[in-house]
Image: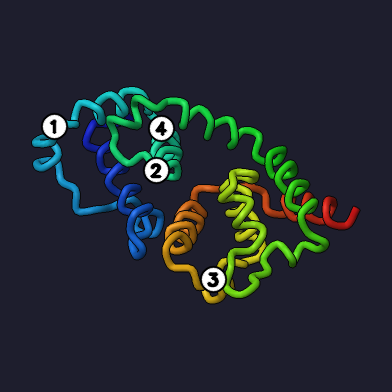
Amino acid sequence: MRMEAFDAYRYYQSLKLHFESTTYDATKYNFKTSANPKSFWKRNDKYHFAKLAKRFSETPELIGYYTSHFINGTTWVGEMLSHEDKYQSWLKRMQSISYLFEQDINKLSSQVNSFDELFTCTDGEKPVIINMYLQEEISLETVVIINKITGFMKRLDKEITETILWPDVSRKIRKYDPFIQVDLDKMKKIILKVFTS
């Protein structure tokens, strides 16, 4: 079935709300919002959505496109269309996720003596895993995957006392989670291999 401009807009609205809100979950609500065709056709940027609807016939591809931009801080559809590099970079990461994950695990292991040390907070400060992500030494995907395996974020949200940067970082990690689909057993094996060798 051909995607319509309004469909492209509806997914955009849903994902924008998902990444910016603390309560709305796009996957839980099946990408439904209060968006309606009548208000959509009054928008000045509707032609951007028509362009995306023509380009992406598959919903998962469009969701990936929007996700790749929202995690990089691009929130306006017009800006997304002029920053194709963000989507292409995201696609490459998704295609080589196991390799990138292993590279990141090697980097992380060189900074600590044990796997658990990655999540150790001292005096309410951010742990190694978060600092390395913020310094762009490891990817957001790696942090999300490790959280899928260990659930370390619950503890960090209680232990990190910094209130300016951390709430946004925490929300981004949590909100990105449903869009990272990987073989967790394979990822666990990579962690074990690196940390036990």
Q: Nearer the viewer, residue 64 or 143?
A: 143
C-alpha gap between disc 3 and disc 4 = 40 Å
- Percent of width and height locating residue 185: 73, 54
C-alpha gap between disc 2 and disc 4 = 24 Å
Query: Which circle marks residue 160 in the picture?
Result: 3
Choose top left, top right, bottom left or bottom right for residue 98: top right
Q: Amino acid at mark 1?
A: Asn
What residue is at 75 percent from the left and 55 percent from the top?
188
Q: Is residue 104 left or right of residue 163?
A: right
Does 188 sit above or below residue 157?
above
Q: Amino acid at mark 4?
A: Glu
Count neighbours of disc 2 (C-alpha within 10 A) and say few if under 14, some if 14 to 19, many if 20 or more.
few
Q: Earlier in the sequence, mark 1 or mark 4?
A: 1
Choose top left, top right, bottom left or bottom right for residue 5: top left
Q: Can you identify the residue that label 4 sits on? A: 58
Does 13 sit above or below residue 99?
below
C-alpha gap between disc 1 and disc 4 = 25 Å
Choose mark 2 or mark 1, whichever is in front.
2
